């Protein structure tokens, strides 16, 4: 329906989240020649770096390590990446942080947004990231909301109404995550694998997320039906739309 | 993703339901040159024909009137129509009725299915129709399930996994109807209007469903965003997917 | 809003349910001079008469005992009572049973209907009773639905759209029972107590349901606010509306 | 049950919300001779004034325009109006803002409260307003909570437990808005129309909210039943009770 | 709390379900020396035997094959197995089938019951099996409900209130399956593997369900916490309690 | 499964909550020789001390009274108690308050945590307490999160993953409280009674919470089944697990 240039924006609470949970969607987009931008709100330096703390690393060292790993993973997926360095555990919500995200939205002009779901009993940073991503999206649409430098946006600066997809959390059922979109990532999976391998501290996750992609791939095939002739090795990722789908064709 | 021939199947409890609730989707499909088939499980002869009963018509007369009106409306939408004449108020579920629907699925080979939502505190026939439509869809997929004449299907006879969309009930919130698909029916609306006008006994509904299409159209625009440049007069219909969407592209 | 004559209809799966769960509402109505009719679909002869089976009573004896107890309790509440004797454990749903209930609706012309909630993991007869009560209510509204003797109703015979209230099950949270109506039964409580005392086999329940009435009474006061000056000893019953309230005044 | 003086309090996030969503309820109350007070937490100057920003108006000009429009609309409905000017997009929650609302509650002594529902994926200001309205209501009940000037309330200053009704959001199903109260606003509709016409910048909304009132009116009639003899042109507004209804009569 | 002899009853719609979904729980029980009984309501001869139908096998041949495979798998798990041969696709609910299950309950005297969850959009036989398993459990508790041969049970024949656990369906989120019990099956996993290998036609499932056990094992560790020192290779199965847990110690 | 020392931590918004809602669980634990610690975030000085305000007491007096009552009640239950004095009505959430709770978690090393449920339309302090209790629990697990004095924890200081149980609110159904654990507190009830009697200003609650314990006790028996031989006078408390249960045995 649209004639806008496809642009994917991924808002991630910590430096690694976008790889495990949305690597396939990101690589799919960049393989189609589309632009993808990842925004990490924090490095996950306190809450997701236990092995480095145990090894006696300092806070700054840990942040540097995680930043460079995330940059390598984003490169493997073909995506740009930026870091807001808001701190984690807890990731504190603030009008200032939201204002910086508004700037990102207006610069990136996303046609699709990916972020965490709104509930996670195991990690409060994830819903906090989602709330800020959603609030910034609405504010970025309004011509009366100033940019963070105080200037007012022009009509071209504000954004449209890009659909938002929540990516899969670690324990989906506990997070009220009921997928309503199953994404075929078969072709993109090698790039996702390469990105996962940029995160050596979590080697056991490589196999784990490969097995999950198989499981979601089975659901892709089951829901698509046998007529489509999808290959046995179909790989998948699960998503949950936040807003209704708008379409001119039911399919 | 598929290379199958598009074919729309609409399972309607009574003779008029498909017009008010899904006329736009049906006309959209036939205007694209696709085939659409409506199956009316009953004529709505007892529960939705009060004015004719009050006018002293007999049961057979009422069924005949409603049948011809529904045929005219289907023609206006460009759709085929058939009637199972299962009786209404109540529409009684039975293995035999489901078996007849299995035959329909295998003959029509639908790529998209439309039916009622699974809850309706105002009309038990609607969920009964939905349950039979859903059960028949699953049975029609199985090569071990015989046709209603006792013959076994070939591999070509069984069906795939067509997506199912619930159309909008009269009191959506009371029916747990939370639309996750908003369909742009602007171009198809004149045909829907023509179909509505084939149902003269419910003249007050014409205006009512036109106003609803405007309201759903506002939501189409709101969820699509201003960038898409949809016209002020966008008309819409609301649907609810029962199974997750399968896709190779998030959009 | 209405000028109809108030008439309360209570559809109860077993012979005792209406006393424990709705005795206050029934007595309140009859104390206002309104008519109340209880329909027991079964006597609860198999599922709720363990002590009588252990005492070696026959099926017919048990049904007779429970019938006379229920008649005494209904009398204490000022209500009429009738029995459909459909059998319990399980209470089997059938078009014939629903048709008999349609007759009851048309004869009683209820302005308010009370029945069980739609879920109960401890007793499948309760939701079965509710489903039949709800289906019969919808069928009784339709002029095209014949009476059980095959005659067609006149315009005066069909019923309006009486509100339906679910009464409180034994384990409310497990039955998805979220009360949205708290009924002040302070004045009616003595009659409820008298009715409970007509059921001597369940003596331990008397105290239990008195304590529940206190607890619901505390909620009546809490939700009404201190300004209303309700007495400390306010007694209550909890209900759940199935259909939206229709009103000309928010209060 | 109460002998308190009826007083309606409407807490609105932006300057126009109360007109579209609750104009009928407000006019109904004032037409019965009751007092109604609208509190606008912001003017909607940033998020809901796009056309004025595009026309080059300044922030102060926009606030002044919206204030005078809202004053005119309130006058048309017969209601008092006040403005807290807390800013919008985002409407930021704070203890200070809540304290000012506590003062309003104690001054107005509402017997009924109307506000936004607690979820709205399209506008975070609406749930923020609702959360503050609900928190202030609870604080205003406590004699130990000081007024915003530091003085302690007397027993007469604190409030009771007025029922809270959420009014209808723009996309009800997406906001988990399941109406459980349908209000007949037929007599009040001309005043609602006059109030809508005080908001000339949103002329297309006049027709839209008229059509919605027709749709809700159909539901009023459907849920009230034919016996009540409501006129064909019944107009309605939908509400959702937050607390259970307290009553001495089921009806 | 109890002094009853542990006895596990598994009610399975088709012949293979108990292996994939509950093999770990069954083997755990038998490895503790407890008795386990599997009841297959059908062989899954129509709906889950596509490859055999394609290979031209007859209905009787398919039933025999599936029966012997299921017997081998049950043996590998150390469980007894019986077959009610009710037919599948659809598995039709009936009072007679429930009565046969009542007999099973009274004979087995289960202390724990496992069955399918109550919703499954992909397979209506699964919820049908669950509904019958739950209904029979309640009927088997009542001394007034006769055995299927017409005799009445003694006080020793009726059953207590065994907890019911739903096992994991193939697409958990679509089936409203939110696990509230994570079972450590590490020690039992080799037996589950052996049982899976008794089902050679579904070889691709072996790996799939191994990966799922790893994923649920990660959740076992995550929810147990690091203090418990669970091994890296912890394997798990997910369950959902239907009734509240009863306990004398919170843990 | 664990070899950790049992330690119960109760996080209570106000000074009395832990007595009414969790007194049985606390006394059960201490009667087994386990350690129990209650943390009161506030004294409930503004929101739950109306009678003392009406009697003209000062803020400091009220806090002192409620503190000493709570200390007496804790002593009666055999528990330690501490007070964070964060203020109530509203109980304001802050990173500093959470940090103090992190210290408590690391000091107490709880194996079980009790707190309020996450929703309460009648008292916003309760969910605020729960949110802080849950956030602190997650932060206390992370070795990268400093103690509130800025020091970093050792590997022994961080905590595991203790299960969290929500205790019963005053109006459970309105708080989405669906108990999934029923605790037998028969033996502990005398100590709970003694603790309740330490709160003389709320004498009417003694009887009320005794009646509630009877009601929950009936549900304990109903869900445990008759085989267990629980006494007629079984007393209970209801809880809701927030995280899935982890177990090696289904029971």
Image (spheres, coloured by chain):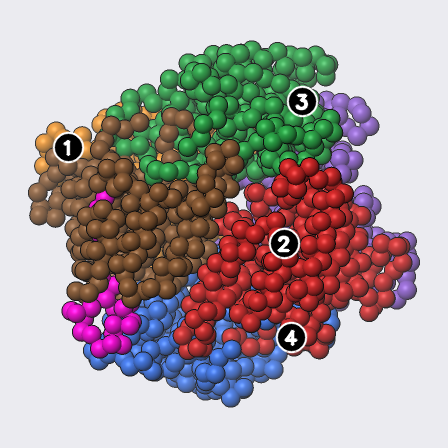
Chain colours: A green, B brown, C blue, D red, E orange, F purple
Front of the two marks 1 and 4: 4
Q: Chain of mark 2?
A: D
Is D64 left or right of F210, judged from the image as shown?
A: right
- For mark 2, what is the residue? D199
Q: Are marks 3 and 4 on the same chain?
A: no
Front of the two marks 3 and 4: 4
Magenta stretch contains residue B41: yes
Residue B185 in percent (x, y) is at 37, 44
- For mark 3, what is the residue? A84
Residue B162 in percent (x, y) is at 28, 38
* Residue at image point 56% right, 61% down: D239
Q: Secondary structure at mark 1?
A: loop
Range covered by the magenta-colored residues: B36-62
Front of the two marks 1 and 3: 3
- For mark 1, what is the residue? B155
Is A5 left or right of B74, judged from the image as shown?
A: right
Residue D32 is tagged as: 4
Q: Is residue D234 visible?
A: yes
The answer for how far apart the CA atoms under marks 1 and 2 are is: 63 Å
The answer for how far apart the CA atoms under marks 2 and 3 are is: 41 Å
The answer for how far apart the CA atoms under marks 4 and 2 are is: 25 Å
Q: Are marks 1 and 4 on the same chain?
A: no
In the depicted structure, whether residue E216 falls above or below residue B203: above
Q: Is residue B142 visible?
A: no
Residue C210 or residue B226, whichever sits in front: B226
């Amino acid at each position: 329906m649209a004639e806008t240039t496809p642009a994917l924006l991924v808002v991630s609470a910590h430096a690694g989240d976008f790889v495990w949970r949305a690597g396939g969607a990101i690589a799919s987009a960049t393989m189609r020649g589309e632009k993808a931008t990842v925004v990490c709100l924090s490095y996950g330096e306190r809450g997701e770096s236990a092995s480095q703390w145990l090894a006696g690393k300092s806070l700054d060292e840990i942040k540097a390590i995680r930043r460079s790993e995330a940059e390598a993973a984003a490169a493997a997926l073909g995506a740009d990446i930026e870091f807001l360095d808001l701190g984690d555990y807890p990731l504190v919500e603030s009008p200032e942080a939201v204002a910086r995200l508004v700037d990102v939205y207006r610069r990136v002009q996303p046609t699709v947004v990916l972020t965490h779901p709104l509930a996670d009993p195991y990690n409060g940073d994830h819903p906090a990231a989602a709330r800020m991503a959603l609030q910034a999206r609405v504010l970025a649409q309004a011509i009366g909301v100033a940019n963070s430098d105080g200037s007012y946006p022009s009509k071209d600066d504000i954004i449209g109404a890009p659909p938002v997809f929540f990516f899969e959390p670690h324990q989906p059922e506990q997070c009220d995550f009921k997928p309503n979109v199953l994404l075929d990532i078969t072709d993109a999976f090698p790039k996702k694998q390469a990105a996962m391998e940029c995160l050596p501290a979590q080697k056991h996750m490589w196999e784990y997320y490969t097995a999950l992609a198989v499981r979601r791939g089975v659901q892709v095939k089951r829901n698509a039906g046998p007529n489509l002739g999808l290959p046995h090795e179909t790989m998948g990722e699960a998503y949950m739309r936040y807003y209704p789908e708008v379409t001119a064709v039911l399919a």
